[in-house]
Image (tube, grey):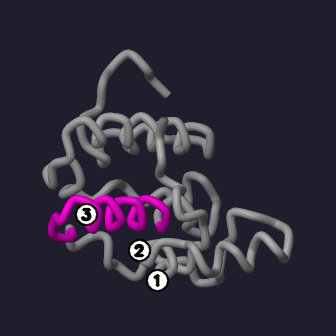
């Protein structure tokens, strides 16, 4: 993944993703930029579907939609249409933790934008220092 160019939108940020590490890095960098200037235009264009590239059962696609929806909620922005596409929801629940006890915590604290996409993460899953 090229790190020389600064990608302004989520779509641009995820366009060159080839691995899960690429996705994590691209999303983190996007969150840093969005935090500085939260604008709907940064989320409007639908990112490419990564399911077949990452072979992850749609985890990255669902996570991108959940992240975008959550950011819209936090900043009182309208949701882009793409975040509600059926391909942006996990078929089976996915937890950011393996242990039963932690999974129970995630069930309670996962933000709504993630829960409705069958993703169970911590309340601060998108927090960047």
In the visual, does 92 lie left or right of 48? right
Q: Which mark is residue 116?
A: 1
Query: In the rendered structure, does residue 70 fall within the stretch colored magenta?
Result: yes
Helix, strand or loop for disc 1: loop
Q: State left or right for residue 74 relative to residue 102.
A: left
Q: Looking at the image, do the residues carrying marks 2 and 1 touch, with CB atoms under 8 Å apart? A: yes
The percent coordinates of residue 43 (x first, y second) are 23, 54
Give the secondary structure at mark 3: helix
Highlighted range, magenta: 62-79
Crowd around label 1: few <14 · some 14–19 · many ≥20 (10 Å): some
Residue that label 2 marks: 113
Q: Residue 41: image x %, image y %?
A: 14, 50
Rendered position, 23 above or below 56: above
Identified at 36% across, 65% down, the residue is: 70
Decide which of 120, 14 is in the foreground and name it. Answer: 120
| Location of mark 3 (residue) | 72
- The Cα–Cα distance between marks 2 and 3, rounded to whole angstroms, is 10 Å
Magenta span: predominant SS is helix
- What residue lies at 52% left-to-right and 57% top-to-bottom? 124
Relative depth, front residue between 19 and 78: 78
- Give x and y (percent) for residue 98: 82, 66
């Amino acid at each position: 993944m090229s790190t020389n160019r600064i990608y302004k939108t989520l779509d641009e940020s995820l366009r060159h993703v080839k691995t899960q590490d690429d996705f994590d890095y691209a999303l983190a960098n996007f969150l840093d930029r969005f935090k500085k200037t939260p604008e709907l235009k940064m989320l409007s264009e639908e990112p490419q579907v990564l399911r077949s590239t990452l072979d992850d059962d749609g985890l990255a696609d669902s996570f991108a939609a959940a992240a975008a929806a959550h950011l819209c909620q936090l900043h009182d922005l309208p949701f882009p249409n793409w975040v509600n596409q059926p391909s942006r929801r996990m078929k089976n629940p996915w937890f950011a933790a393996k242990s039963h006890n932690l999974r129970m915590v995630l069930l309670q604290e996962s933000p709504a934008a993630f829960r409705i996409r069958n993703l169970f993460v911590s309340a601060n899953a998108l927090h960047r220092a």
